Image (cartoon, grey):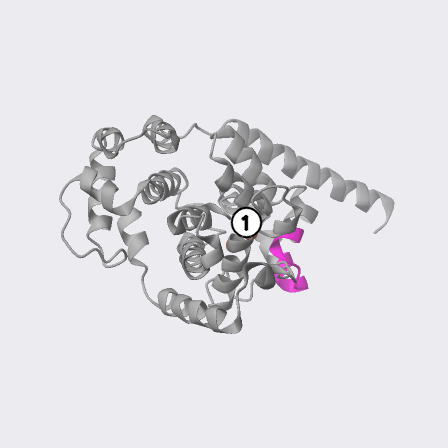
Amino acid sequence: MNQPLQDDYARKVSERYRRVIENIENLPALPEIVTRLLEVVNAPDTSADDASRLIERDPALTSKVIRLANSAFYGMPRSVSSVSSAIVILGFNVIRSVVLSASIMKMFADPSKQTVNRDHFWKHSVITAIAAKELVRHLLSFKLYDPEGAFCAGILHDIGKLIFNEYLSADYREVCQYSRDHEMPLLDAETLMLGINHAEIGRILADKWALPLDLELSMVFHHYPDRSEEIVDFINIIHQADHIAHEAGAGLFEEESVTPEWAESRSQLHVDDGVHDRICELCVAAATGPVEYLSIVR
Ligand SMILES: [Fe+2]
Ligand SMILES: [Fe+2]
């Protein structure tokens, strides 16, 4: 590239970077009910009643939580009619996933911005979440983690892509096209063309919304878990789950290029081929039909 062209390109990238950063700064805070719930859910002495009192202030959220508790997705043996029993049965981490995903889905739902096909986006997120939950369930050495905590991190891991879709819709279309044409991982194409990638956006968002550390680090390091200094094994679960979701055919678009799998990812998690294939099969089955979790939460 000659010098004027190079300068022009650099100007374009920094203009896109400036635009996205400005828009994130002006992004609305999470609804108060969500921030209060995150505080309540993270507090050590919280009871199901504390959380249910908050949820019951919001009729839409109330109905989502109760429907989810009665859904086949969670397959509970008896019917649940109150928010507090739903919380006791599902646990705080499920509540965290529901309130966060429901409010983010609502926040980014402008039908005119469709570079990112939101159906594909959320399906990829849920399939990653399902794989992450299954990985924790099947790995005895990760008993320390709640499978539903991994589910929540899976749901949110790629949220930066929604920000690009919202604020740089036309530019992001070019990025996706470039990634496809050059078989370059989307993350790298974002860095090249926007000056920032969806993982870095995750850090800004987590900061702005005061999200818990497990969610923040999963957003930031899910492509390179070994670059994190904390909870590497937890982030690695999301990394592995992300790859399984792609393998199961649930990408953002067809033939989406992804950063390579960390060579040590499976050995660090003690995932043998049997576990991997079983989770993959489950994800293929989940990816081929409508996802009940989404139809309830959305
Ligand atoms: Fe990603
Ligand atoms: Fe992903």
Pointer 1 local density, CA inside 10 Å: few below 14, some 14–19, many at least 20 = many
Question: Quick check: 245 left or right of 107?
Answer: right
Q: Nearer the viewer, residue 240 or 60?
A: 240
In the image, residue 192 sits, relative to residue 246, either above or below, namely above
What residue do we see at 39% from left, 37% from top?
107
Q: Main secondary structure of the magenta part?
A: helix
The answer to whether the beta carbon of the residue marked 1 is less than 8 Å from any atom of ligand 1 is no
Magenta residue span: 178-188
Picture coordinates of residue 77 (x, y %)?
A: 17, 57
Q: Nearer the viewer, residue 214 or 7?
A: 214
Find numbered disc 1 in the image and state the secondary structure of the residue it sits on.
helix
x and y, in percent, of residue 174 in the image: 61, 52
Q: Which residue is mark 1?
A: 235
Residue at image location 80% in from the left, 46% down from the top: 5
x 38%, y 39%: residue: 100
In the image, residue 3 sits, relative to residue 122, either above or below, namely above
- The answer to whether 178 appears left or right of 115 in the picture is right
Q: Is residue 179 magenta?
A: yes
Identity of the residue furthest to the right in this view: 3
| Residue 27 or residue 94, whichever sits in front | 94
Q: Nearer the viewer, residue 75 or 158?
A: 75
